[in-house]
Every structure is written in structure tokens, then in C-alpha cells.
Amino acid sequence: MKKAQNPDGAPRRTFLKAGSLVLLLGVQEIARGATIMAVRVWPATDYTRVTIESDGRLQTQQLVVGSPPRLAVDIEGIELNPALRDLVGQIKPGDPYINGLRVGQYAPNVVRIVFDLKQAVQPQVFSLAPIAAYRHRLVLDLYPEQPVDPMEALIAERLRDAPRAGSAVAAAPPAADPLGDLMAQQATRPSAPQPSAPPQVAAAPARPPVAPVPPPVAPPPPPPRVAATASRTDRIIIVALDPGHGGEDPGAIGPNGTREKDIVLQVAHRLRDRINAGNVNGSPMRAFLTRDADFFVPLGTRVQKARRVQADLFVSIHADAFTTPAARGASVFALSQSGASSSAARWLANKENQADKVGGLNVGAHEVQVQRALLDMSTTAQINDSLKLGSAMLGEIRNIGARLHKPQVEQAGFAVLKAPDIPSVLVETAFISNPEEEANLRSTKYQEDLADALMRGIQRYFAQNPPLARSRQL
């Protein structure tokens, strides 16, 4: 029997084998390839993040080159497409780390991205599995080799502002104080046996002898306050403000597209201005923001930042959301060691604690160890102080006419509230999933009223719970 022939005369079985081989290679090629769907850049003082989203996991190799500093990243198994080319236009002049970049087809199925850097960096390159609205993500985090010390930055800011605050006082001539001047002169002289009679008294003209005057009981009045002098120290009262979410993590999104991460940052900025203009019993206040722009900060890192500046209070700001638009009202939460105070509080804590997965945490990095170290360090005293702070804030929020979701401070296991030595609360400003409250959150007036209420709550708390002594001074 004659074998079947293909149109070119080859045996049919041979043709089928060749076809199967071609089909098999095609499947393998599809399996190892990926399509770039979107690119995003998140510049910030802390670090710059570049995210490349694709429909499959990407394999990379990277090389850091110095003088001038550059970072080359080879992405394997892909072809250059318009989405990747768009990355060039997303680099802004104000980016602290990236001066520019080049992207091209380095080899078949290999795209190379070269970052021209403004300073030496410590890059972290890692992949994230699909979650929420995201597919596979390749993340490039560019951290500075020499990070800025947040405490030094706060002190520098205070010193910069101090001359303006004290210029009027410093310009006024000091009142005459002969006794104070005399004591100041004596204090600056080397130690020596004192004469039996002070020369100044003996040299006084036309004055009869008098008995020696005993030293004054009260200390001399302090010299006039002048800014930024070594003889003047202030106890800085630091309030850490923690705008939730950020960067890759938008937080809740309202029915009209309002993003939680944007609203809470605006409220934090307004509250920061009030704190920086305030004081506690004469000691200046300073607000420290765990993020001051649109970038992602892991939950454990937020706590670590607040502890690093020895914050006196920690206030995390959020906008609540629920599965139905009917839910409404502001809430204040403190940490709980023994379970949530309600099922709603437990649900919310579980949702907020997922932020690291959405925002993109480099699993295995030092942030994970930091989080684990903080998990069980909360104290009863911290929680009690947090409840006092929360009650003061909740009362002030009620006073501006805002609806409350619950009339008392609730408790749950929020990871971001686990600083063991800092009274910490989480404020849910309103339900962004409720159309009416979403509109309120977008309004300047509501944000201003809310910032005023939170500031009064902080002041009420400090009035009854003075800040503890610290070694931190200016």
C-alpha cells in the first residue's frame, strides 16, 4: 500500500511529526514569553520604585555600574513594546535618584533597561504574584546608599524655622540686669580662691561699708531667647502622622473614583501644618510623616520610622470602605491584645493588614524581620494611653458635627499600631464607599474641620497626659 504524501511529496507520518514539533515549540515559546501591560514610576525621597506589570512572571538580571552610577536590568523572554517605551517618558526631572533611562532590544527575547542615576543606590529587584487588580509585577526599588536620618531632618527643619519665630524677640534689646551680668561673668572665669570682699562692692563710689550680701535663693532670670544658640535647648514634641496606603496601593476607591491614598495624604498635610505651628507647655511641636508623597511604605516600616524619631504619638489616617454604600461615619481604633472589639473592627483590621501584599513588599527583606520583631511587643500601658488619645479625638470629631460609626474607641489587631512605646491610634475619617461621605472627603472644608478636630484631640490628650521626658533636644 502506498504511503500518503503531503503536497510536497514527503510521507504523511513525517509531515505530522514535523507539525507536532513545530506546535510543541510554539507552546513552549508562548509559555516562556510575557507581554508588558503597564509601567509605573513612584519617585520619593525615601526611594524610587519602578513597576513593570505583565501577564506572566518576568526573569531578570541586573548590574550596578559606578562612575557615573548606572543600573542595567535585562528582562528575559520579552520583546520591546510601546508600554515599555513609555517608561522613558515617566521619569520626571525631580526624581531624586533617576536622571533618565534608555530601553532597547538588547538581544532576541531580551530587553535591556539602563537607568542613569543621580547618586549611588542599593537596588532591590523582586517579583510579586497577582493580587487585587494587579497581574504579575516586576518591582525595582532604588534606595540611597546613604539614607537621610529622619531625626536630623526634623531638627534641621526646626532650626530653619526658629529664627523666624524668634526674630522679634531677638531684635529687642535685653533689659538691664547688673546682678545677672555679674554672675554670668563669674561663671565664665577659671576657678580660683575668692577674695574676702568682691572687688565690685569695694570699688563702689560714695557708698558706706555694708555687710556681705548672701547669695540669692532663686536662680537668675534666663537670658533673652535667641534662635539656634548653644545655650538654648528645646524638648521637641513629635507626632508621627501616617497617611495610609500609597504608591502601588491605592487603598479604597469611592464610587466616583476618589482614592483613599490621595485623601488621607491631604488630611495629613493639613494636620501637619497645625502641629508645626503648635506647642505643648512651651515646647515646640513637629509633625513627622511616614510618607509625604505618593509612594508605598510597608506597615512595619511605618512603625519603625515613628520609633526612629522617638515619636510621642502615632496617628494613622485612613478612609473606610464597605461592600455596601450604606455604611457611614468616622471611627477611631486602638490596638487590642485580646481580640477585636467587634466583628466589623476585626474585618477592617484584616483588610488593612493586607496592604503589604497589595503595595508590594520584598519578601525576605529586612522589613519582614522588623515586622516580626514588633508583632508581640505591644504593652498594656501603650494600649491604655492609645485609648485615651482615641477618646479625645473621637470627642472632637463629634464636635464638628461629623457622624460617628461607633460612639467609642474600637480595638483590633492593626499591625500599624504595634509600636510598643508610642500611644497609637488609627482614624477612619469617613466611609469613602458612601457617596455622600466621599463628597465630604473631597471638600476642603471637611478636611480643614477634620484636621482642626484631630489637632484639638491631640492637645486635649497632652493637657491630661504630659509628654514623657526624653533625651531628644534641640
Image (cartoon, rainbow, N blue to C red):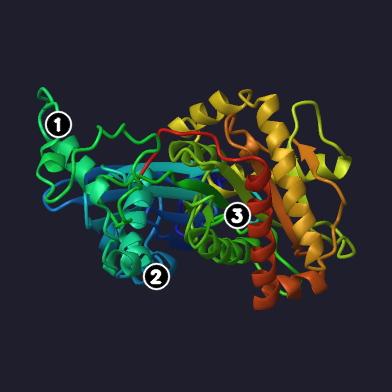
Query: Residue at the location (65% across, 65% down)?
Result: 452
Task: State which quarter of the image contains the N terminus.
Answer: top right
Q: CA distance from mark 2 to mark 1?
A: 86 Å
Q: Can residue 231 be seen by looking at this rendering? A: yes
Tag 3–tag 1 contact (CB < 8 Å): no
Instruction: State the SS at label 1.
Output: loop
Q: Residue furthest right?
A: 326
Instruction: Classify mark 1: residues with Cα within 10 Å, few (<14), some (14-19) or many (20+).
Output: few
Q: Amino acid at mark 3?
A: Tyr
Q: CA distance from mark 2 to mark 3?
A: 19 Å
Q: Earlier in the sequence, mark 2 or mark 1?
A: 2
Residue 86, label in figure: 2
Near-viewer residue (283 or 74):
283
Q: Amino acid at mark 1?
A: Ala
Near-viewer residue (209 or 118):
209
Per the image, the residue denoted by label 1 is 197
Query: Residue at the location (59% across, 29% down)?
Result: 420
Residue 134, label in figure: 3
Query: Residue 35 location in percent, x, y?
Result: 49, 58
Foreground disc of the pair 3, 1: 1
Q: Amino acid at mark 2?
A: Asp
